[in-house]
Image (tube, rainbow, N blue to C red):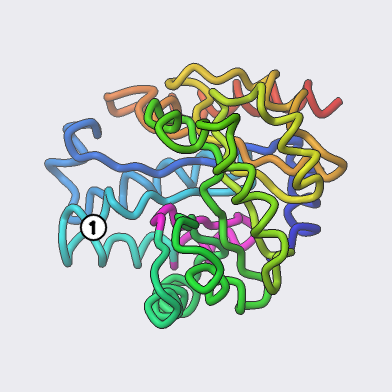
Amino acid sequence: MTQEQLFEQITLKKSFLCLGLDPDLEKMPSHLVSSSEDPLFDFCKGIVDHVQHLCIAVKINTAFFEAYGVAGYKSLERLIKYIKSHYPDLFAIADAKRGDIGNTSLRYAKAFYEALPFDAITIAPYMGKDSVEPFLSYKNKHAILLALTSNQGATDFQLTNEGALYKSVLSTSKTWKHADRLMYVVGATKATHLQHIRTLIPDSFLLVPGVGAQGGSLEEVFNHGANKQVGLLVNSSRGILYASGGEDYTEAATQAALVLQQQMEQLLR
């Protein structure tokens, strides 16, 4: 999927919402957990079926599936194949935070781009060019580098020396082969840095977690971070997934997503 196709979806749906799928059996509606043979899949499928018209991307956090071993991996495989077969225009992100030496990264790329039909994967860039470029060798696939994250520990390294590390990630990565296939994670709680970030990567899409439960401002993210193609995938996970713990969980999720989509539509105007 290309950036131009992403922008077409933003324009069509009047949304730049990314639905985060972090299924937790302890938080799911109890009736579903007790009755379903595959609650991870059924829970996520129900949410996606009801919310897909309001979002342009889905971000599947693979840890929430890997935690359940082989059964969890089968649910992950079943879910991503369902999403891409039924909603091919949804940009599918594997939030797996991979990144290793070249041969290993190439195998990770095969896993998430060939065995599983993801459009993008999140990457930890600490090991540099040869750990990332294997993910960039696939046409119309994207590597989403961690740049400036929303968690509290981001200050340990990313923001020291006036943000030298995250700025180096942004500027250096743009020199790599197929750098046009790069996207970047920038947390909503770091929205004040977005204006400078846009001077370094004016044309790239940003995956922005942290709106909602973590306290990030959607309006600030848009005002500081939007470019000519909008260039934002604003993620919401818990605020949509667990809007209700009852049998109306899909309806509650739809309403929560609709609120965000309507706010985005206003900003896009």
- Between 60 and 254, the one lying in front of the other is 60
Image coordinates for residue 20, horizontal then vertical, percent: 46, 41
Q: Residue at x 48, y 49 (%)?
A: 59
Q: Amino acid at mark 1?
A: Glu
Query: Residue tagged by mark 1?
Result: 66
- Between 253 and 15, the one lying in front of the other is 15
Image coordinates for residue 80, horizontal then vertical, percent: 43, 62
Judge the density around disc 1: few (<14), some (14-19), many (≥20) Cα neighbours within 10 Å: some
Q: Residue at x 61, y 69 (%)?
A: 141
Image coordinates for residue 10, horizontal then vertical, percent: 75, 43
| Number of numbered discs visible in the structure rendering | 1
Q: Quadrant of the C terminus?
A: top right
Residue 43 is one of the magenta-drawn residues? no
Relative height, residue 187 to residue 92 (above, below):
above
Q: Residue at x 70, y 52 (%)?
A: 171
Image coordinates for residue 204, horizontal then vertical, percent: 74, 50
Image check: 225 left or right of 18? right
- Name the outermost residue toward the left: 34
Kind of element beneath mark 1: helix
Is residue 250 visible in the rendered image? The answer is: no
Image check: 80 left or right of 184? left
Q: Residue at x 45, y 56 (%)?
A: 126
Q: Quadrant of the N terminus?
A: bottom right
Is residue 2 visible in the rendered image? The answer is: yes
- Between 71 and 114, the one lying in front of the other is 114
- Name the outermost residue toward the front: 161
Residue 90 is one of the magenta-drawn residues? yes
The image quarter containing residue 199 is: top right
Q: Which residues are magenta?
A: 81-97
The image quarter containing residue 231 is: top right
